[in-house]
Image (cartoon, coloured by chain):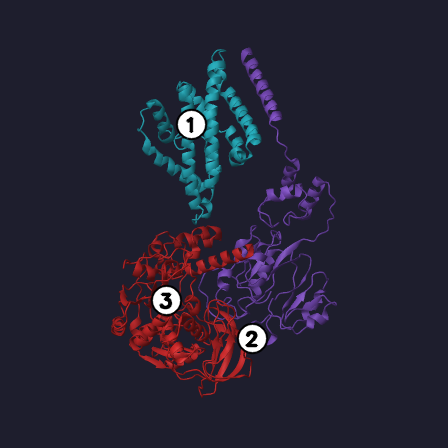
Chain colours: A cyan, B red, C purple
Amino acid sequence: MKTLILIIVSAVFVNNFVLSRFLGICPFLGVSKRIKTAAGMSAAVIFVMTMASAATWLFYEYILVPFNLVYLQTVTFILVIAALVQVVETVLLKKSPTLYRALGIYLPLITTNCAVLGVAVLNIQKEYNLVETTVFGFGAAVGFGFAMMIFSGIRERMELCDTPVPLRGTAIGLVTAGLLSLAFMGFTGLVKQ
Amino acid sequence: MAGGKFFGGIHPKYHKELASAQSIEQMPLPERLIVHFAQNLGAAPKPVVKKGDAVRKGQVIAEPQGFVSVPLHAPTSGSVQAIDLFPHPVGADMPAAVIVPDGKDEWAPGLNAPRNADGFDAEKIKGIIRDAGLVGMGGAAFPTHVKLSPPKEKPIDLLIVNGAECEPYLASDHRLMIERPAEILEGASLFARALGVQQVIVAIEKNKPEAIEAIRSAIVERRGYSLRALDVVYPQGAERQLIFALTGRRVPAGGLPMDVGVLVQNVGTAFAAYEAVHFGRPLIERVVCVTGRGIARPKNIVAKIGTTFNDAIAFCGGQRGESGKVISGGPMMGVAQYSLEAPITKGTSGIVLLTREEVAQFVSDPCIRCGRCVRVCPMLLNPSALSIFVERLRFDDAEAYHVIDCIECGCCAYVCPSRRPMVHHFRRAKAEIRSKAAKAS
Amino acid sequence: MLTAVIALSALALFSSFLLAVVARAFAVPVNPKIEEVEGALPGANCGGCGLPGCSELARRIAEGKADVDACPVGGESVALKLAAIMGKAFEGGAVRKIALVLCNGNDQVAEKRFHYNGVRDCTSAAMLFGGDKACLYGCLGLGTCVGICPFQAMRMLPNGLPAVDPAKCTACGKCVAACPKKIIKLVPIDKRVHILCSSHDKGAKVRKICEVGCIACTKCVKEAPEGAITMHDNLAVVSYDFDIPDAVAACCPMNTIHVRALDGAIERLEEAASVSGGAL
């Protein structure tokens, strides 16, 4: 139990996927203009990352390892993730149009998101078991969502500021993200690596 | 009774000493009177005279339209020279009747006769008040008889007589309280009878010690009446803030004082009610404080409704120094005038003349989010955020941040280091929101 | 090596098969036309069609609830494309429109009643006695229209009047709605004769407050072809259904009627304004 809690704390604060590991910057900058869209994106990421963690771990454990195909890890993981997300999207559109409208539009954005692949690879690196893998995937996504919500809140307020023309839009966004990363460095050492 | 200081507010320099020692003086009839038809909130009355008609003092020249409307009376005897558009001090050109006095100042028959009001019941009192064309004299100009007729579901247990006069420069209510305290209290008692209320509080700010003394002496015999001296802060005289300071009751946002069982009336309105009920005199003149460094002799004058600013200023010795601004009302909530042919209306409590040096020429800057405005807003709003929203035309966000609750007191603009014209922004936002709501319905 | 190839191929085939099955099993009918129509629309989301965005208009056009020429920004070219997609007939030939401010009372020729020091926005200024201009129908020159144009097609000239850039104006109508005096109109871009005044004041009053205002002398009504110019409450109004010869402009004693090529470069307008200082 303690290990699992530490995994979550580490994934959300100490080694935040966006602000410490710098993964998933693309949707982080692209979908964070409004708090509402950021919330939708975060929910979708949590959904996908948790499932992808588990799915890739299972794939690794029961297909790659027995057949000695570990070196195909990167390629096959992308395939598995992409197929999984596509299946989820199709099923979601049919089964729950409301949920689809809420987070379905973000699903294609997550497919090639390096954060999802990153979490899958990290799981293998850290030699987690299935439970730990799933929890880590969940924690990573929660951390991602956490960073996105903070960032989108700041960006919404910045829209009301008189930003100098050269810095408007993404430029000031990146400066802000950098400052946020600096802030999150304060968590270093909270969990022994 | 609980209460205390309301949140926010400012302490501007009041400059009341310019006019506070000037006893009320009757201004002689000017050469012409421009009497606007729209002098009250609600429906403007419809004219019943035309060009060339002869009128007598107190004669009805416009009939009320509906319940929230009051009649308009000729301020003196004479003839109607014209009916046309003239500048109205609130900020637009509006229809008015130009009356040329014949010098006789003859009352219409049946008016200006003393009578015993002891037997008058609530309905009779309200009827007389309505027929006399009474409106709130503090500036809001809301029909008094409507205010005195709250719905049965909102019982009133307290009447507040508002002698706070928190606007800088103005001293008309102050002098009225010093010189006519008994009449004011009698008017208040008429309101109390009309409402069936036992408890009456007269509220005066502490910077008017003479007025406090005068009212205190006059109030002695009256049971249920009390006098409360309030701390000097602007806008102490605003209804919600006054009610909170005196009783601790909070009028809900979007609601009215009657929602907490209170009614507020200005001392000038109380005086006018006394004149109307005891003497059958309709509202045709009022005390106006002509003050400021831009006037040669500051005075508190009784001027006929329709007296142009030009005539009032001439009676007070004319302008002094280079003219900066001429404001109808006070410097916080009044309206600067571009034409001195604008006349005194039922709601004009003062004319403030500022010299050129006193008026700052400024360019406003972006909001620096210092938060001073948030600290002073008596309605607990966020003027900084609201003004930024309006600048970016985000009226929906402004509505979500409660711009409708703004009382336009001007505290935020007063303290802003960037000199942002926030009240102007908020008026614009309110107009947009109202027109959007009107289009939707 | 071989195992890798086989393994990957097997994985790819399996995934495709799985996806195909799932797609078939969980198919949702979707109107393909909506996407096609949306692709043909300009995608500026300007709201010129009156709807909140291009997606909404695409949906309505695809469902047949809106006309193929509903997009004012896309104009004729887009309308033709949409007509082809929807299999409808569309007759071209609609003339392009452009915004025109019907006031030429710049700071030199139009009188001001007072010095305005408030919010630099026409709607806000109009709340104070109708604005600082003596003519209550005139342009206040504070740039509400310039600020609201989604295509940056308007700019304020130094003489206090806005100018419209024909290269960018799409006649979306946002400025028309934003102007508090309601003196901006959408006019056909090929018409050259314009009466640049919106004042309904009587001639005597106009003479006092503006050097280029319409005094309702009706000379132009008589000079122009029958019905081309009509009087509306002390104001001469051009009907753009007619072709008015350039010479008519010369008859106006107040210089209110102008011959102006609306499709000319905006730089020419700015130059003319700075050189003449007065009426363009």
In the displayed structure image, the side of residue B303 where residue C207 appears, left or right = right
- Residue count near mark 1 (Cα–Cα under 10 Å), binned few <14, some 14–19, many ≥20: many
Residue B397 visible in image? yes
Q: Which quarter of the image is occupied by the N terminus of chain A?
A: top left
In the displayed structure image, the side of residue B146 where residue A108 appears, left or right = right
The disc labelled 3 sits on which kind of residue?
Answer: Gly
The disc labelled 2 sits on which kind of residue?
Answer: Lys
Instruction: Indicate which label's residue lies in the foreground, 1 or 2.
Output: 1
Badge 1 and badge 2 both on one subunit: no
Helix, strand or loop under label 1:
helix
- Residue count near mark 2 (Cα–Cα under 10 Å), binned few <14, some 14–19, many ≥20: few
Question: Which residue is under mark 2?
Answer: C208
Q: Residue furthest front?
A: B119
**Chain letter for the residue marked with disc 3 in the picture:** B
Residue B46: horizontal and vertical position, in percent?
53, 73
Question: Which residue is under mark 3?
Answer: B196
- Residue count near mark 3 (Cα–Cα under 10 Å), binned few <14, some 14–19, many ≥20: some
Instruction: Indicate which label's residue lies in the foreground, 2 or 3.
Output: 3
Helix, strand or loop under label 3:
loop
- The span from disc 2 to disc 3 (Cα, nearest Å) is 58 Å
